[in-house]
Image (cartoon, rainbow, N blue to C red):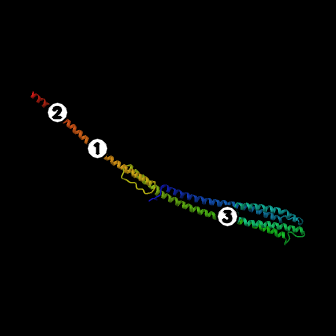
Amino acid sequence: MACNWRIRHKLVLGMSLVTATLALLLAGTLYGLASYRQAMGTCTSKLEEKDLAANIRVQVKELTQSVPERSKLAFHFEERIPHIGTAIDQYKKKLDDTIDRGRADNDGKEALAFVEALWADLKRFRTALKEEYDHPSLDLLGNGSKVVKIIEDLDIHVADLIGNIDLEINRRIHTTRQEAQKSIWFLACTGVVAVLLMTGLMRFFHRWVEQPIRALEQGVSRVAHGDFQYRIQIDTGDVVEDLARAYNEMADKLRAMYENLAQQVNERSRQLVRSERLAGVGFLAAGVAHEINNPLASIAFCSEALES
């Protein structure tokens, strides 16, 4: 027995389930695409940061490469400091852009800490050079020199910064893989549910709509062939049942009209037969009267002659 809902309610239910399934599939697809886009954006920004961080390291390496004679060493360092500062500024701007776009883990606090450490090292480096001007006999690149220690700290902090960038890239790739797996599982489960749902909807549609309509079609066909005794039995609680009830009422009226018409035809037939019989009797009576009138006329004529 079909569910006693109106047919529009059944159609609305089916459309709602299909729409919900499509919405889930769309949501899973958009989630996967958003995760992929976020990962690509993060990796792009981090690779650009890595290039700028590598530029900082190159500028730091320039401090100890192509070292001039001792008398010009301090001037060489003073000349390289602005390049290092510019490289740090460029990296800081890129880092701020990454943070503004939401592409940095933990709001970029670790990278900002490395930037602050680089600025602190650069400030210490300037202080150490000032001490060199105050003490010209100090060996800037000698063992135990503050300048050498600061350059090493700069190199270590830049290396740590690059390592942190690589770690964030790997972390983001790992997170994206997990999100992609979740998205795939979600889409797969939703797809299975969608297939089962569509199968169930087709089955219920067959029971709720197709079977009642087919029963209505068969009943109407039998009524059309003159079987007015047949009754269409549909219990769906919707417009199809109302239509079947209307057809049954129409069949009852047609049957009553047919029976009345047959009765009238029989009555008319009997009247016609009786009329034909009466006409035959009248014709016979007229013939008999004619045959009797002829001899009676002769007898009357002879009687009148005898009487004269």
Q: Mark on residue 173?
A: 3
The CA span between labels 1 and 2 is 36 Å
Percent across and percent down for residue 162 are 74, 65
Element type at mark 2: helix
> Is 259 on the left-hand or right-hand side of 54?
left
The residue at the point 28 percent across, 43 percent down is 269
Q: Which amino acid type is marked by label 1?
A: Ser
Mark 2, residue position: 293
Q: CA distance from mark 3 to mark 2?
A: 134 Å
Q: Nearer the viewer, residue 255 or 206?
A: 255
Nearer to us of marks 3 and 1 is 1
> In the picture shown, does residue 270 fall above or below 196?
above
Instruction: Give the residue at x 9% y 28%.
Output: 307
Residues under numbered marks 3 and 2 in contact, where contact means CB atoms less than 8 Å apart? no
Kindly identify which residue carries mark 1: 269
Q: Is residue 48 visible?
A: no
Badge 1 crowding class, 10 Å Cα cut-off, few under 14, some 14 to 19, many 20 or more, is few
Mark 1 / mark 2, whichever is N-terminal: 1
